[in-house]
Image (cartoon, helix red, strand yellow):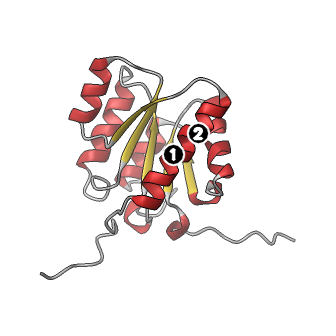
Amino acid sequence: MNTAPVMTSKDIEILIIADDPVETELIIGGLAKQQLSDKLLHIDNRAEALEFISSAGRRYKHIADYHLKLILLVTNLSNTSGVELLRQLKTGVHTRSIPVVIFTSSKEDYHIIEGYQLGVNSYIIKPAGVEPFDRAIRSLCVYWLSLNQCPFHGGERHYNR
């Protein structure tokens, strides 16, 4: 008998877009240490990520139904799919105000500048070693999920001023 609670779209706070299984395992392991692994959705390929972002497929609910606080894009901006995903995220009606953090191994100034020009909220170079990696994930979680205040992304609420 399965007694695990059913996760709804409102439970998802973190979207991880990463195609490297080793890095993904490290990230999810770091999030599990912060008791956040039950609040994430992992997408491991560009086509599925674009489907999710555009809410064009049947696999997921409309992105506005999720209460995302963070999108962690694990990519190298030398990869055209990483640039295209970031561009889609930062121009999409339902995704442009969600913080996007690039988590990458590239220290190239060109990639950092391009990331910020495309609207990334933070650019983090992945540290080597499990302990520094876990510290980076912990710091990322403390700031983006605890301290940072995100607007409501669903579009159903209208504020009168």
C-alpha distance separating marks 1 and 2:
6 Å
Residue at 31% x, 66% y is 151
Q: In which quarter of the image is residue 131?
A: top right
Determine whether the residue tagged by mark 1 lies in a helix, strand or loop.
Answer: helix
Amino acid type shown at disc 2: Arg
Residue 58 in the image: state x and y as whole percent. 48, 58
Residue reaching furthest to the left: 161
Location of residue 36 (image quadrant): bottom right
Instruction: Mark 1: give few (<14), some (14-19) or many (20+) Cα within 10 Å.
Output: few
- The N terminus lies in which quarter of the figure? bottom right
Q: Nearer the viewer, residue 138 or 43?
A: 138
30 relative to 81, above or below: below
The residue to which callout 2 is attached is 135
Q: Are marks 1 and 2 in contact (CB under 8 Å)?
A: yes
At horizontal 64% and vertical 44% (from top left) the residue drawn is 30
Secondary structure under tag 2 reads helix
- 26 to 93, vertically: above or below: above
**Residue depicted at x 66% and y 37%:** 25
Q: Residue furthest bottom?
A: 160
**Type of amino acid at the residue the image marks with label 1:** Ser
Please name the residue that numbered disc 1 is placed on.
Answer: 139
